[in-house]
Image (cartoon, helix red, strand yellow):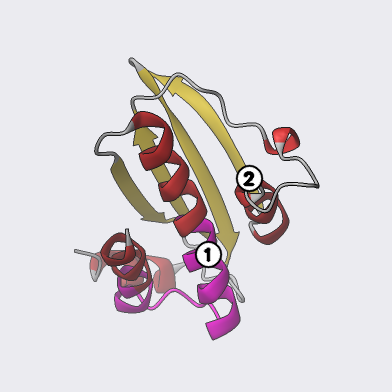
């Protein structure tokens, strides 16, 4: 999981996504939580997609678990199980959708500044 987290951050930096260091730490934490859930519940590999829209960095994690993400199931007396609450609090938006025999869980973090016009085209043309 740490290599996947680092790769997401490395992509954001390579694409020169206008996110502060604090925002990148939030992305890394959200990615850790979503990836950990995917691995824990599917007990299999998952697929990660990272997109830069010019306004938001979107991370999607597809797994084969049919267990639905629910941030409300975490109990206050238990030390774990609050990952989705963190994602909901740190990301600008998040959600999930069924995909094939599993689901995709995603979150988005808005850029510190909006990139528009030719600047979007320049950044997208530099993406791998």
Q: Which residue is mark 2?
A: 81
The location of residue 64, given as percent across then percent down, is: 33, 25
Q: Residue at x 35, y 64 (%)?
A: 8
Q: Which residue is mark 1?
A: 29
Residue sticking out furthest to the right: 76
Taking depth in this image into account, of 102 and 15 the one nearest to the observer is 102
Left or right: 92, with 108 as reference point: right
Q: Decide if residue 10 is on the left or right side of residue 117.
A: left
Looking at the image, residue 66 sits to the left or right of residue 110; the answer is left
Q: Is residue 33 above or below residue 66?
A: below
* Number of residues whose C-alpha sits closer than 10 Å to that of mark 1, classed few (under 14), some (14–19) or many (20 or more): some
Indicate whether 57 appears above or below 36. Answer: below
Q: Is residue 49 above or below residue 127?
A: above
* Residue 35 place in picture, x, y as percent: 41, 48
Residue stretch rendered in magenta on the structure: 10-31
Earlier residue among tags 1 and 2: 1
Local secondary structure at mark 1:
helix
Locate residue 7, reporting x and y percent.
28, 67
Q: Residue at x 61, y 76 (%)?
A: 113
Residue shown at 53% from the left, 84% from the top: 21
Q: Quadrant of the N terminus?
A: bottom left
What is the magenta segment's predominant secondary structure? helix
| Res 10 → quadrant | bottom left
Q: Nearer the viewer, residue 62 or 83?
A: 83
Q: Secondary structure at mark 2?
A: loop
- Neighbours of disc 2 within 10 Å: few (<14), some (14-19), many (20+): some
């Amino acid at each position: 999981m740490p290599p996947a987290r680092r790769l997401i951050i490395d992509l954001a930096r390579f694409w020169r996504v206008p996110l502060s260091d604090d925002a990148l730490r939030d992305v890394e934490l959200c990615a850790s939580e979503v990836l950990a859930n995917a691995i824990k519940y599917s007990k299999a590999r998952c697929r990660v997609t990272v997109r830069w829209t010019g306004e938001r960095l979107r991370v999607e994690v597809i797994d084969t678990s049919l267990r639905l993400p629910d941030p409300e199931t975490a109990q206050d007396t238990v030390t774990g199980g609050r990952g989705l609450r963190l994602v909901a609090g740190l990301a600008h938006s998040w959600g999930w959708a069924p995909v094939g025999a599993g689901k995709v869980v995603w979150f988005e973090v808005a850029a510190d500044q909006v990139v528009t016009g030719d600047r979007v085209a320049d950044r997208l043309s530099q993406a791998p």
